[in-house]
Amino acid sequence: MGRLAQTDGLTDIQREILSTVRDFVDKEIIPVATGLEHRDEYPVQIVEGLKELGLFGLMIPEEYGGLGESLLTYALCVEEIARGWMSVSGIINTHFIVAYMLKQHGTQEQRDYFLPRMATGEVRGAFSMSEPALGSDVAAISSRGVRDGDEYILNGQKMWLTNGGTANLVAVLCKTDEGHPEGTAPHKSMTTFLIEKEPGFGEVKPGLTIPGKIDKMGYKGVDTTELIMDGVRIPANRVLGGQTGRGFYQMMDGVEVGRVNVAARGCGVAQRAFELGVSYAQQRHTFGKAIAEHQAIQFKLAEMATKVEAAHAMMVNAARKKDSGQRNDLEAGMAKYLASEYCKEVVEDAFRIHGGYGFSKEYEIERLYREAPMLLIGEGTAEIQKMIIGRRLLEDYRIQG
């Protein structure tokens, strides 16, 4: 383990968890990740190993069978897992966001029903905001839930569900008119519905179809899907929190912790890219010496290491702020923005260090080069992060009088 991306002030339990996860990544993920990724194969054995380690319940309270750990512990585990293969961290992240939303906003019955089985990985979560005709403009969604007695009828089409096929619980954001008069702000007429379904593709529940996996440039292995609702019936007690009109707030709360997760993923991928670059630079020789001895390569390594260290520090700060009970949207936005941008740059520099071999599928850096761009988009684009950061800064630094 190198000097970079160390975290001071961890407890013995946190250090033990991280050591266990890092060992799992080195032995069970890194050796098989590239082969699985090239085949776009779901990592069944890896997921089973994560279940045994208890990582699906890492932040779920102990009373529901989880480990009750902090966001910082979770983020540091994600950093380690993404260092091995970013797709695996995606499998955990969507599950984690749904579990977090249930813990924070669910009714007691919903928490009792879902969280113990989510802690073991028996129930695996996915969440859905985006739609084919919109990306970051969540307030413009057209999917709709209409009350019908003791049920809601859901209609609409959703896009970009990570875990859409393998999950058996999906938190879906829809518009609801019930109790919201005409002219209500769009974000105040949204509701999160908890949909239980069978894993797989096709019609997985009456009226609910998962058409198939979306073929992607990178971020393979994990299934990314659409979700089509055509008269799906959901019991009224599966409205998250038992009250309509709270969905936008609930989802944004989940995405806020998700942004810390994406920052952690960026840190992990960047760290792995640095490891590959610094290792290759000492093995590859040109003009009679290892390329690591050329000043041009040393400059690249210096820049890469600095970016790895800076991104890690910002990610840790954002997680600790949330854990302390403080608002962290500014810090989470900054961490997500910086870590994803730096990740792309560190991966590209490692790619350049590899020269022509970086273009070969035999080398791990080729996979990282295709994975890094997803972080620029997931959980809000860089442009959205900058909007959030700018608005929050103006709140804090507004001129008085």
Image: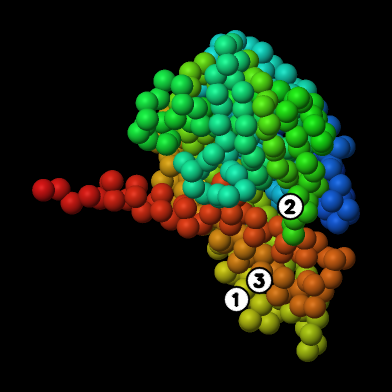
Labels 1 and 3: the sequence-earlier one? 1
Q: Determine which quarter of the picture holds residue 359.
A: bottom right
**Residue matched to label 3:** 349
Report which residue position mark 2 lands on. Answer: 219
Residue sitting at x 18%, y 51%: 399
Where residue 145 appears, x then y in whole percent?
A: 56, 27
Please say if 338 is above or below 143.
below
- State the image coordinates of residue 363 (x, y, percent, origin top left): 83, 65
Residue 113: image x %, image y %? 66, 13
Residue 299 got which mark? Answer: 1
Circle 3: residue type: Asp
**The disc labelled 2 sits on which kind of residue?**
Tyr
- Estimate how packed mark 1 is, as few (under 14), some (14 to 19) or many (20 or more) residues with alpha carbons within 10 Å: few
In this image, 338 relative to 229: left or right?
left
Residue at x 74%, y 59% (from the top left corner)? 217
Q: How far, Cα to Cα, is label 2 from label 1?
A: 30 Å
Q: Secondary structure at mark 2?
A: loop
Residue at 28 percent across and 46 percent down: it is 395
| Badge 1 amino acid | Phe
Residue 342 in the image: above or below residue 50: below
Tell me if I can see residue 197 in this picture. Answer: yes
**Proximity of marks 1 and 3: CB atoms separated by less than 8 Å:** no
Does the image show residue 31? no
Q: Position of residue 102 (x, y in %)?
A: 58, 23
Q: Secondary structure at mark 3?
A: helix
Q: CA distance from mark 1 to mark 3?
A: 10 Å
Q: Nearer the viewer, mark 2 or mark 1?
A: 2
Mark positioned earlier in the residue sequence (2 or 1): 2
